[in-house]
Image (cartoon, grey):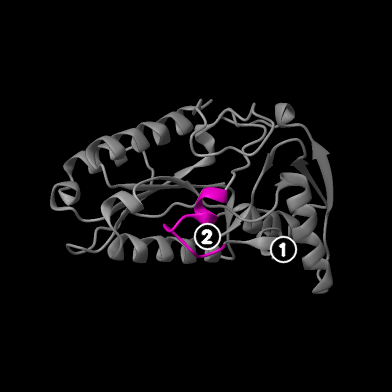
Amino acid sequence: MQPAWSTLTTPSKAPIWHSPLTGMARRASGCGGGARGDPFCAWSTDYVFDGRKSAPYIESDQPAPLSVYGKSKLAGEEAVLAAHSSAVIVRTSWVFGPDGKSFLTTMLNLAKAQDVIPVVADQRGSPTAVSDFAQALIAISRHALAGGTGSRSGIYHVSGGGEATWFTFAHAIFSGWARRGFRVPRIEPILLADWNSPARRPLDSRLDCSKQGTSSVSRCPIGGSRGTHP
């Protein structure tokens, strides 16, 4: 699940962060940051890939989105890079947090009403705590302000450490919930093909974050085991 962050435009010479919504291409072409040399940054999604690689995706892997959602994000990436040669695009995956709508809050809300919760067990990804992702974006922004144009541009993957399926993620959530003394439901594994989703989703959208971890763009490590334990 993806967070719904609103667009934020900041004063000249501060990084300009944009969410990867359908209108990002229009915003990118209309923003003058590239002409002034201001840092321009946007975040995107693992759903630009089709999930058929069977290994974590690196930044140079060919995108092949399966859904309109993924295609719109890829179009936004391409528009940003075309309009701003020094832009930074950060792809992330499976973002969750204690507030708003995410897999974590959805599971806890369902637990209040259901004794059994069906959860997809064959879709794999890298859960990312929103607090970790925010810290990574701050680090990238600071570097964008301090570094040279060539050193900060390009696409980077930033996601939580490790991997999970939605089923194992749910198991970790409810294990933590049980340790706090709450009643937990039984979770039932199902296949992605059996889940009534309005959009096609990649079966394996894990992201390889080694470029982000070793690059000067961000020296803020992300996640670790916190990515799957609330």
Position of 123 with respect to 80 (left or right) is right
Is residue 214 shown in magenta?
yes
The part of the chain drawn in magenta is 210-221
Residue placed most toward the observer, 192 or 143: 143
Give the residue type that dot 1 points to.
His
Q: Residue at x 84, y 43 (%)?
A: 188
Q: Position of residue 77 (x, y in %)?
A: 36, 37
Q: Is residue 45 above or below residue 228?
A: above
Residue at horizontal 52 percent and vertical 49 percent from the top: 211
Q: Earlier in the sequence, mark 1 or mark 2?
A: 2
Q: Which amino acid, mark 2?
A: Gly
Instruction: Give the CA separation, mark 1 to mark 2.
Output: 18 Å
The residue tagged 2 is 100
Q: Position of residue 39 (x, y in %)?
A: 26, 55
Q: Residues within 10 Å of mark 1 (few under 14, many from 20)?
A: some
- Residue behind mark 1: 229
Residue at coordinates 83% horizontally, 74% vertically from top-left? 181
